[in-house]
Image (spheres, rainbow, N blue to C red):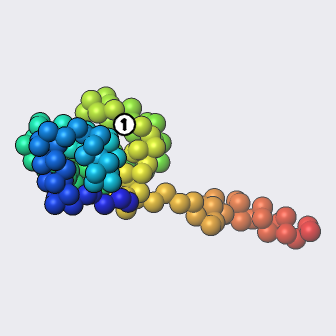
Amino acid sequence: MPKAYSLDLRERVVGHVEAGHSRRTAAAHFGVSVSFVVNLMTAYRLRGSLAPKPLGGRRHAKLDPHRLFLLRRVAEKDDITMPELAEDLAACCGAKADPASLSRWLIRNGYRFKKTLLASECDRPDIRQAREEWRAER
């Protein structure tokens, strides 16, 4: 990820432009792009600061305020599908969320929906008996 230009360079570029030079001349003089100088001067005039905006950081999920509802709904119905959960969220809280976003949010919050290696039906007596008969015939 690229780093922001130093505050020292920013101050020199603004000083150069405010001394009466054009933005293109300032860009050529300091070896930066014209768009950087134009954007810097615009931001300086609007904000009054030369400090760069913060880069990166954690985006806050729009689903975090609905955490209790989502966890309670998943606990009530553990086999709920993501489209059903999205519909319930929209109906109850008025928040619109894509099913894929809900799935990623649940995974980030420790919920994993993995299939088991052995189907639960294998433990039923009738299935076990049918499997043993099938093996005996082979």
x and y percent of residue 82 in the render?
Answer: 45, 42
Residue 122 left/right relative to 9? right
Residue 77 left/right relative to 127? left
In the picture of the structure, the residue carrying the numbered disc 1 is 97
Q: Residue furthest right?
A: 138
User: In what quadrant of the picture does the N terminus appear?
Assistant: bottom left
Please give the name of the residue rendered at 32% of the width and 36% of the height, measured from the top-left corner: 89
Please give the name of the residue rendered at 33% of the width and 54% of the height, measured from the top-left corner: 31
Query: Which corner quadrant of the image does residue 132 belong to?
Result: bottom right
Residue 116 left/right relative to 61? right
User: In what quadrant of the picture does the C terminus appear?
Assistant: bottom right
x and y percent of residue 122 in the render?
Answer: 66, 63
Residue 94 left/right relative to 100? left
Observer-nearest of 29 and 45: 29
Query: Which corner quadrant of the image does residue 20 belong to?
Result: top left
Q: Quick check: can you spot residue 53?
A: yes
Q: Secondary structure at mark 1?
A: loop
Please give the name of the residue rendered at 27% of the width and 57% of the height, measured from the top-left corner: 4
Query: Which corner quadrant of the image does residue 46 belong to?
Result: top left
Relative vertical location of residue 12 with respect to residue 25 in this rendering, above or below:
below
Relative vertical location of residue 71 with respect to residue 91 in this rendering, above or below:
below
Relative vertical location of residue 9 with respect to residue 27 in this rendering, above or below:
below
Please give the name of the residue rendered at 32% of the width and 42% of the height, measured from the top-left corner: 34
Q: Quick check: can you spot residue 70?
A: no
x and y percent of residue 117 in the render?
Answer: 62, 67
User: Crowding at label 1, few (<14), some or many (≥20) Cα neighbours within 10 Å?
Assistant: some
Query: The residue under label 1 is which amino acid type?
Result: Ala
Count the labels in the image. Answer: 1
